[in-house]
Amino acid sequence: MDLSAINPVLLVASLMVAATPILIAAIGELVVEKSGVLNLGVEGMMITGAIAGFATAVETGSPLLGFFAAAFAGAALSVLFGFLTQIAQANQVASGLALTLFGLGLSALMGQSYVGVKPPQMSDIHIPVLSDLPVVGPILFGHDIILYFGIALTAAVWALLKFSRAGLVLRAVGENHDAAHALGYKVIRIRLMAILFGGACAGIGGAYISLIRVPQWTEGMTAGVGWIALALVVFASWKPWRALLGAYLFGGVTVVQLNLQAAGVAIPVEYLAMSPYVITIIVLVILSADKSSAPAALGRNFHASR
Amino acid sequence: MIRLEKRPQPSRVWSMATPLVAVLATMIAGGLLFAALGKNPVEAIRTIFWDPLFGEFAFYYRPQLLVKGAPLVLIAIGLSLGFRAGIWNIGAEGQYIMGAICGAGAGLAFYPADSALIFPLMVVAGALGGWAWAMIPAVLKTRFGTNEILVSLMLVYVAEQFLASVSLGLLKNPEGFGFPGSRNLQSWDAAHNAELITGTGMHWGVVAALIAVIFAYVLLNRHMLGYHIRLSGEAPRAARFAGVNPTRLVLFCLGTSGALAGLAGLFEVSGPSGQISIDFNVGYGFTAIIVAFLGRLHPVGILLAGGLMALTYIGGDIAQSNMGLPSAAIQVFQGMLLFFLLALDLLTNFRIALSKPEVV
Amino acid sequence: MKLNKLLTSAAVAFGLATGAVAADDKTKVGFVYVGPVGDGGWTYEHDQGRKAVVEEFGDKVETVYVENVAEGPDAERVMTQMALEGADLIFTTSFGYMDPTINVAKKFPNVKFEHATGYKRADNVSTYSARFYEGRAVQGHIAGQMTESNIIGYIGSYPIPEVIRGINSAYLHAKEVNPDVQFKIVWAFTWFDPAKEADAAKVLIEQGADVILQHTDSTAPQAAAQAAGNVITFGQASDMAEYGPKPRVSSIIDDWAPYYIARTKAVMDGTWESSDTWDGIGAGMVKIGEISDAVPAEIKASALALKASLADGSYHAFTGPIKKQDGSDWLADGETADDGTLAGMNFYVEGLEGDIPQ
């Protein structure tokens, strides 16, 4: 065993990268759930975003364009979900699962000719002086811009929910759609917009995996990250900053687990691999004292009847 | 302008007709997809829906429908009880795994004994394994108020890692030359969940699924507990006034769905699958959630929905091999089917009315 | 979009729907895949083998495949279906298909089955596998000399004999050329999760490894190595040439084409017999991808010499004296490992640190 081999600075830096796709997707889903809608199709939208972003980046040579395409593709897929649940009043859990199944198939069809292709690289930003600082440099100033986008998004959503009128309306719709409707808010329209936003975020999160974190395209490459993002939202009890913290915890446990292995710590690996999930459950129990947070109308459909 | 009007009662006609309309719509949309992929759409649709039932080799595929559909129905029945009461167990996949591990483990502990008691013991152990795994979210929910969606989902991943661990360690076949995976229960008569009548696909899991359907039907329609379940889902406040004990309801619903999922895992591992291996689970626990909703959480509906899902899986594999369709196209096709079924469900509960625009 | 095409294919569809009777003089070959053909690794290479069969025999052969087939009853059903539909030869390409293959083969004595990486055979069931560990020996030989930090990172999937054999082989040959070399082994506990593989590679690099060997199929570790700079890698399963000349300095490629062609031919000629094939570099089942210019000429030359000696059989990758990790003797001086021990290998050789997870 040689724990000194673990470099904490690099560990934190790579943990941030590991956390980013979960974070972006989770923030999107958080907004969706705040509006009272539970979309279990995150995995499907992420993988569709992953291939749309990858294909666009390869064809245009621009990773940034790829991220726009991914956001668009994720949002496009979420329209299906929005139609089913908001217009056709279908059950949200079933619609979300169907969306995941559909997205996995669709992405595989779209990606058939992109297997084994190397995408254009997105370079890390480099700020003179700052990026070269010891410790702080690699952790704070040496990443790609999407990672910063994820943090900015967290801040923006937090501010939006907390301070803006739009955030207030969104929360009102999620807490009690009948009351919100009575107040004259367009419940369905607001929820559709939230769903679109969630889809776009999931798409970007997926593209982060296919363009930056891995980067390559293979079928099913998101390998369950969408489910983790869903878990993260509940874990964060619908609070953006807690989602950030949680994403680092989720990403961190995997990275730390691999670090311990590489350092030769003799703990059974399969139990280490379980640990993120077990820890989540434990944290969940600890946090469960706080019962104020779940949107009251979560998962319930709204139909304006007179 | 087109407007939706909620029906006072769900339409009986439409609740029967929508599945058929949805299947037809899927055939058309799917046909276009297959044509766009350069395949013969008519042949593809026929291969998926017709061949397994009435094609040249239907004698083989029909029993396979039972084999594929039984675990889906068994799990979905259990889940539907909870879903009706607003208790969301989405971790049936984990309970399925734990049922299989416990059941197979209990049997293998007595290898190579030859006693008629071994299989019943495994059945009990399998049900208990799934039940215990579902009790974790249940107890956490009742004690601490933690969200059961999340806990049950997380436990799926824990169970998958545990499955890998026992495949490589505890249950590894000592005569398997170091390869992962347990002994094959198919070759040990005392533990083998064989076909009850050769060539029919009918094994104990199929029987259990059918019993579960009947049991759930009676429970929901004829029994006080079933009434409480429905009441809790439809009107939680009223349920409390009616004296429903929410804690007991959570324990019952999660426990039952866990036990049924565990049973499904046990019947699978001792029968069609034969052994515990790293990749033993194939997603029945998640597909069953879809089946439960496709069947509108109604026992008979679930039976039919399980059959339909099984049909698309089996037909899809035939279409892959006979027509060279990629498996992704089959997945998209299944996704479409679900979308249409869900979307058209609207017609059961709502009436489409044409009316003049009012104050919008 | 192509409305025209849609309409014509629909028309063709109606025209052909009735007359789709296959000419039966073709040899029909089925392939059952555990992953998608687009996985860029294991299944992808098997599908390349299938395509080679089509190319070789053209009209005389018809191939069918089903991808993403789960091990267990699904696999059994797909094999049965292929046999029912008239397949003459069926390749089942995952270890977990072993018992299903045997079951189905019993029901169809006239259909030939070929099961990859298993150990159960029957009159109409052959097994085949590749001696990847020979490729690992060449990798270790290059890696041991290329490393400057003397730390080599190794990403394993699950601790099964196949993977352990690779680790031992790579370690022995790295140690041979560099006595100070140390292996850091990380088990991903997944067959397929590119993001986790990327993390594993990064972790190993951060802990000082400047060579990454992988027994997982995605290019994620390659990209991580490239981003890190002064790290070299080897392609796995497919060539991964897009990451050459550095970090990817060479690769081990599964090449199933010669075997698939030979076995199909045997069925056509009526000479097919049940057999147990375990081929390596010599028979071309394992290929060493081109060694790039990032490797100094003399190392490249000695690596090629090692490859040649493995290919012609003059050298065995496990030649004694070798001790097990616990210090007990395994192979005496000059003794070579027997296939039985290799097939079920579940121990590390002396010098490797850590325990195999059980």
Image: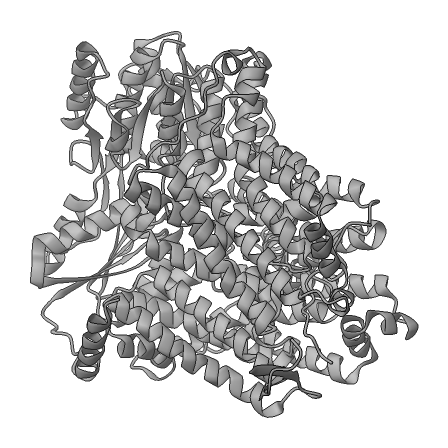
Locate the N terminus of chain B and report the quarter of the image it occupies: bottom right
| Residue C180 in sight | yes
Colour pattern of the rendering? one colour
Between C335 and B267, the residue placed more toward the observer is B267
Locate the C terminus of chain B and report the quarter of the image it occupies: bottom right
Is A286 above or below relative to B319? above
Residue lying at 41% horizontally and 25% vertically, measured from the top left: C154
Between C191 and C177, the residue placed more toward the observer is C191
Provide residue A177's location: percent of width, then percent of height.
Answer: 73, 65
Is C139 above or below relative to A19? above
| Residue C193 in sight | no
Is A18 above or below relative to C315? below
Locate residue B83 relative to residue A5 in the image: left or right: right
Locate residue A154 relative to residue A118 in the image: left or right: right
Image quadrant of residue B15? bottom right
Locate residue A103 relative to residue B72 in the image: left or right: left
Residue lying at 35% horizontally and 35% vertically, measured from the top left: C219
Provide residue B340's location: percent of width, then percent of height.
Answer: 48, 75
Provide residue C27's location: percent of width, then percent of height.
Answer: 13, 64
User: In the displayed image of the protein, which residue is found farthest to the front?
Assistant: B359
Between C103 and A283, the residue placed more toward the observer is A283
Residue lying at 14% horizontally and 53% vertically, measured from the top left: C53
Is A257 above or below relative to B118? above
Figure disc tally: 0
